[in-house]
Image (tube, rainbow, N blue to C red):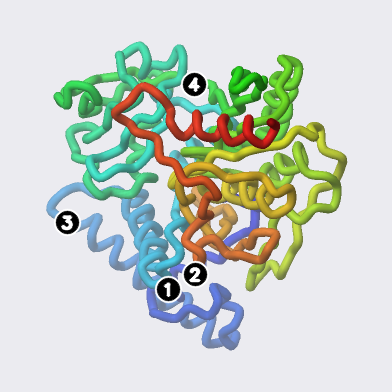
Amino acid sequence: MRARGAVAFAVALAALFAAGLWLGGHPGSLPGPLRDVFVEETGGLSAEAAEAIEGSYYRSVGGQELSNASLQGMVRRLRQSNEEDRYSEYFSPEALNRFNEQIEGHFSGIGVEIKRVKAGSEIVKVFRGSPAEGAGLEAGDTLVSVEGKPIGKRDSSEIRDEVVGPEGTQVTLGVRDGKSGETKEVTITRAQVAFPNVSASTEEVAGKTLGYVRMLSFSEAAHAQLARGVEKAEREGAEGIVLDLRHNPGGLLDEAVLSANVFLPKDEVVVRTRSRTQGNSVHKTAGDPSSDLPVVALIDGGTASAAEILAAALADDAGSTLVGTRSYGKGLFQEEQDLANGGALKLSVGEFFTPEGVNLAKSHGIHPDVKVKDDPKTKADEAKQRALQVLAGQLG
């Protein structure tokens, strides 16, 4: 989850980390004379090492490449030494641009929604009109390589950065067919893809008209899209809403709070945050809800961050039934901190807690009231069907 922020990050952090000192990330904690000498000496050492590599390594290495690798290494070390933090990362200027595009609800890529599996990255959804659809990719297919490099156990963020890219450029993917199991290479030309964040429809179940609203992320203006989706279902006669948050990785904290306000009355606690540097905060709904329909929420292992916040708030504050499988269990929130090279650090800066005070990392996610798992081998969506049945039963 990304909290909006433009806090400058001290360049001296690199020097502190290189010497094995971590004084809360604040070189100002050192005495003035010692700080000046320390930063100058370690910074000079890093520059000396980079110069030696550029001048003597058996292959040509650019200064920017070394700088990116150094920053990535620091953040990787943070994650290794803090097992609950799997989220801090360094964005190069190019990666930051792609990340911000996704937060804004559009990006240049191939147009698929994926989830991490042992074999690679399984395609959950192919966006209509996308390059991926044009190339014949389907939900259930698995990406096993990018540009000839096996996906293996590499970080999801690394795979994402390789798949997305400038409009008009090409990417070659190894794709395992979800039906035949055969693997082939597919070259796809990237294009601008509008992110279809919220979709809404109605279904008749046990004599009840039920709304089904699917939400893919908490990018900018997600709450307004959610409100419109719920309104559409209400116009079509919906007596209740199944809110599908499966495979939703989260996004902006503010959007989670605003989305909760679609269903919850004013002054309901949505999430509590605790931060060493930012203090403690309680985030509440700010106005009257736009819908008073009962809600059943669908969750799974891909429901994370802001999506978990919304699901937990609906359960704690409104007594909503949660259907599906255990959620991801993210208990930290991040802040983007700009760097002088045009990139940024996305650093974990605090913990968040549900309205009832539960940290989802420590509780290993949200455990649903009704457990059901979709069978990928069938065309039917068993989890969705069960959620609709639960909602119809409550209305009956």
Say which mark, if any, is on residue 57.
Answer: 3
Q: Amino acid at mark 3?
A: Tyr
Tell me, for residue 350, which label it has, or none.
Answer: none
Front residue of this view, candidates 45 and 70: 70
Q: Position of residue 97 (x, y in %)?
A: 51, 37
Q: Nearer the viewer, mark 4 or mark 1?
A: 4
| Residue beneath the point at 25% across and 55% down | 54
> On the rendered structure, is 24 left or right of 162?
right
Kindly report the distance in space between the C-alpha atoms of the residues bearing marks 1 and 2. Answer: 6 Å
Q: Are marks 3 and 4 in contact (CB under 8 Å)?
A: no
Towards the viewer: 140 or 170:
140
Which of the two discs, 4 and 1, labels the residue nearer the N terminus? 1
Q: Mark 3 or mark 2, which has the lower sequence index?
A: 2
- Mark 4, residue position: 193
* Whether residue 83 is situated above or below residue 261 in the rendered picture: below
Q: Nearer the viewer, residue 223 or 25?
A: 223
